[in-house]
Amino acid sequence: MRQFDQELRDLRDGILAMAGVAEEMIDLTSQALTERSRTKADQVMAMDRILDEWELKLDRLCVDLLALRSPAAGDLRLIASSLKIVPELERIGDHCCNIARRATYVHPPILSTGSLERLGQETRAMVRMAVDAFIGSDAGLARTVIHADDSVDALYGKIYRDLLRLMMSDPLTIERASHLILVIKNWERIADQATNIAEEVLFILEGRSAKHTYLQGDSVE
Amino acid sequence: MEIDDPRPVPEPAHLQVPPPEAGLRPTSFIQPDLPLTDPSVLSAPTMLRIERLNLFYGEKQALSDVNLTVSRNSVMSFIGPSGCGKSTLLRCLNRMNDLIDDVRIEGRVLLGNTDIYAPETDVIALRKRAGMVFQKSNPFPKSIFENVAYGLRIQGQSDRTVLEEAVERSLMGAGLWEEVKDRLKDSAQGLSGGQQQRLCIARALAVRPEVILMDEPCSALDPIATARVEELILELKREFTIVIVTHNMQQAARVSDHTAFFWMGKLIETGLTENMFTNPGHRMTEDYITGRFG
């Protein structure tokens, strides 16, 4: 294998490792939230450092590859998109920390229908699919992620309205609801990050931007 | 507790992303594949049209059914592995291959409206219209002035004023005037490699060609001299049409509007350079420009 191919493989492997950490943080965050576990919340916050270290390492690798290898075509798209995917994964870690930090402030539960858990699960599934699309070079799966974001946004809006109603009807819920509003906002942002990763996967695979399609007179389909 | 309150709760304003106003959209962005190249290049009239060109050295076919157009005032790069036919094709564009024994050419090459392989075509006049700059600079063992004036002299021009004006104009066009204006009578062979190559470009410019053909013009130059020639190419395309053969992928990416990739005598793919280097349509092009074969 050429040295350059090995370096590109190192980049892919690094992103997969980073995505693995991010997914583990999402799982722990969900558990910390449902189990009211300070231990798991602390684990999440400790893991954030791993993502930060990966970000520095992979940023450096991408810049080195651009400077030293003059990449073109698919190699160039992989490196350019990696420079965008890596910060998305790092931000997922930050959002997990924001949620985990509130794990002990949202109990006893004020939302009874499991919608909060569902928001976490749908977001988790989007991240998993985005990473799988990257690993498997699967444009169809990347498009599924982009479309799934609408469902998460709708769920987020519903929970948000439920929380507003709760606060209006029962002032004793205001403190927990306020924390929950920030929790659901962070879940929704993680789903956005997954969408951004999926858009980069489409750019890597198809060579055209999947972002802001209204400006390009086209849709993701 | 989740309550079922029938009262409508307005959607929080920050959840609503207003659709962009049509008037704010830059119209150029609506094109899905907006070229980075000056769009005028795309609509420029054709300077060279190659139609179903086949070339044989004896029994061996070196070019197979090549169809290609080159727009006026643009730079076209030919890329491909050694032996792919790119230099052979370049030499077809001013009939340099006529000088090789046992060459047979089929198809047409139109320079403007002139079929350059038509029996009535004046080859000397053709080479005036399509000048060639070679890989290795080849100044004549004459003065700088006489090198540049050479083409005009063999056309019969002997008026000193006309020659002086042409030499100055050509050397300025080649970005060499300021460096040599005080030593025009010195031998051209005393110039540096980069200066000699620009002198050869000036020599080609002196006869006012329409097309400049360049066969790896920077392969023997250092990075600074290469950068000067590349800058010169970008300036020259305002007046001329340029076709360049290069093994340097980055050079093709830097200087050309269009790139054509050849393999085993066949044109595999051609297109806007930025598309060829970011999202080529053919797997072989991708493998070549990413260094995976060739």
Image: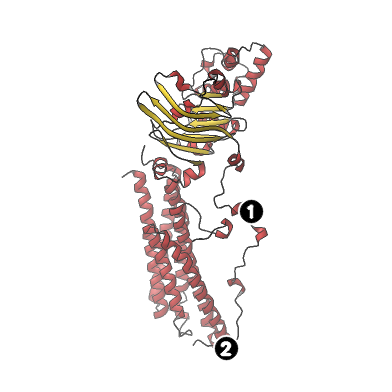
Which residue is the site of mark 2? A169
Helix, strand or loop under label 1: helix
Tell me residue B106's x, y (percent). 44, 28
Q: Quadrant of the N terminus of chain A?
A: top left
User: How far apart in space, not on screen, are marks 1 and 2 (Cα)?
Assistant: 49 Å
Query: Is residue B64 left or right of B28 when viewed as pictured?
Result: left
Q: Residue at x 54, y 50 (%)?
A: B33
Query: Is residue B56 left or right of B17 when viewed as pictured?
Result: left
For disc 2, the chain is A
Tell me residue B166's x, y (percent). 64, 19
For disc 1, the chain is B
Three-letter residue code for mark 2: Ser
Which residue is the site of mark 1? B27
Measured along the vertical axis of the image, is residue A22 above or below residue A2?
below
Looking at the image, which residue sits at the far front? B119
Measured along the vertical axis of the image, is residue A152 above or below residue B128?
below
Q: Could you say which quadrant of the image residue A70 lies in?
A: top left
